[in-house]
Image (tube, rainbow, N blue to C red):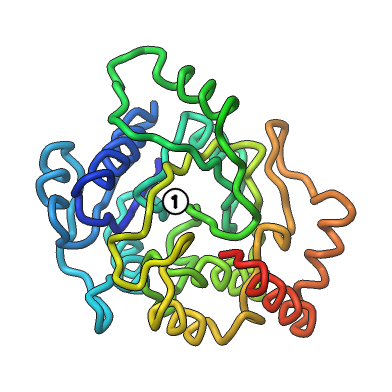
């Protein structure tokens, strides 16, 4: 039903734990998804073989050795056996409500995305435990933190909907640009926060020499911003023009509907971009 593609970090230390958790959770979905891992970092080939998922080792990288999202998006849309694709970061756990939500979206074109719950996860999940989902949902409700409207970890879209620019993976900016690009092309952007529970397993950014407290900074972050055309060419989930609930697709509440309309005008987007920069939102 869905082809999920991702670009893992090296399967080393804590990243090994949370990335295994993420991919294994995707394999638990009742309608088994096609999964494609991109990249040749440590452990990717071995994990792909162990879990019987697809692996594409060759991917274009920037001058710092970071894979480019444009290469993965282009290849995935050519290779996918399904008409619906989802890009996800490799630290994100999904439940069955993902599949149920996609079934309610309706006819293409569309871009589905949503906020995530941030949670500390330090060990591998026992997916043989029939209550693993219930236990994880309970933990999230007790100690999880809902993330802001920026920093989107997954996107669901029909094949050939997205043409990604040369953004570096794992660096801020590209997600906001994608929402902007799709909205400016008059394709519905659907906020599925209410319908899809998304668990982001917290981690540090030590995999990059440009790591900062909450993100990867330095020249790669600046390059991503430049590729996007600046902060004025980025949007967040506040600017989504539809909301997916348990009942179906609805228009946003009044205030968010106003923000959605204003976001089509550059001066407003520029002001929001400045605000996000000052507040350190990514």
109 lies above or below 71: above
The local crowd at label 1, few if under 14, some if 14 to 19, many if 20 or more residues have their Cα within 10 Å, is some
- Residue at screen point 85% across, 49% down: 253
Residue lying farthest right? 254
Tell me the quarter of the picture where residue 127 sits. top left
Residue 143 vs residue 250, the one in the foreground: 143
Residue at point 46%, 43% (across, down): 200
Q: Is residue 109 visible?
A: no
Report the residue marked by disc 1.
Answer: 84
Q: Residue furthest front?
A: 213
Q: Position of residue 13 (x, y in %)?
A: 21, 45
Q: Is residue 144 visible?
A: yes
Quadrant in the picture for the N terminus: top left
Above or below residue 38? Residue 12 is above
- The image shows residue 263 at horizontal and vertical percentages of 76, 72
Q: Is residue 192 above or below residue 268?
A: above
Q: Is residue 135 left or right of residue 91?
A: right
Q: Secondary structure at mark 1?
A: strand
Residue 67 higher or lower than 154, as above or below: below
Viewer-side residue, 187 vs 27: 27
Task: Where is residue 108? Give x, y as percent.
Answer: 57, 55
**Residue at x-position 43% and y-position 60%:** 159
Q: Is residue 247 left or right of residue 113?
A: right
Residue at the far top: name it: 130
Measured as percent of width and height from the top left, residue 176 is found at 58, 68
What residue is rendered at 51% in x and 24% in y?
139
Image quadrant where residue 125 sits = top left
> Exactly how many numbered labels are in the figure?
1
Image quarter for residue 279? bottom right
Assign the C terminus to one quadrant of the image.
Answer: bottom right
């Amino acid at each position: 039903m869905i082809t999920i593609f991702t670009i893992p970090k090296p399967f080393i230390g804590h990243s090994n734990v949370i990335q295994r958790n993420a991919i294994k959770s995707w394999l638990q979905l009742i309608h088994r998804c096609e999964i494609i891992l991109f990249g040749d970092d440590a452990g990717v080939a071995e994990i792909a073989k162990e879990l019987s998922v697809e692996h594409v080792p060759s991917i274009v990288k920037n001058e710092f050795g970071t894979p480019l999202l444009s290469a993965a998006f282009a290849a995935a849309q050519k290779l996918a056996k399904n008409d619906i694709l989802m890009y996800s970061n490799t630290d994100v756990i999904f439940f069955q409500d993902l599949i149920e939500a996609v079934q309610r979206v309706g006819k293409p074109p569309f871009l589905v995305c949503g906020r995530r719950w941030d949670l500390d996860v330090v060990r591998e999940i026992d997916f043989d435990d029939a209550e693993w989902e219930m236990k994880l949902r309970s933990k999230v409700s007790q100690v999880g933190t809902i993330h802001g409207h920026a920093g989107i970890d997954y996107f669901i879209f029909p094949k050939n909907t997205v043409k990604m620019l040369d953004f570096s993976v794992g660096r801020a900016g590209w997600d906001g640009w994608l929402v902007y690009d799709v909205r400016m092309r008059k394709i519905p952007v659907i906020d599925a926060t209410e319908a899809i529970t998304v668990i982001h397993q917290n981690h540090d950014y030590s995999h990059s020499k440009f790591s900062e407290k909450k993100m990867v900074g330095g020249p790669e972050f600046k390059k991503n911003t430049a590729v996007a055309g600046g902060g004025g060419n980025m949007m967040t989930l506040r600017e989504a023009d539809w909301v997916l609930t348990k009942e179906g697709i609805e228009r946003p509440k009044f205030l968010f509907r106003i923000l959605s309309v204003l976001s089509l005008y550059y001066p407003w987007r520029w002001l929001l971009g400045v605000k996000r920069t000052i507040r350190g939102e990514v």
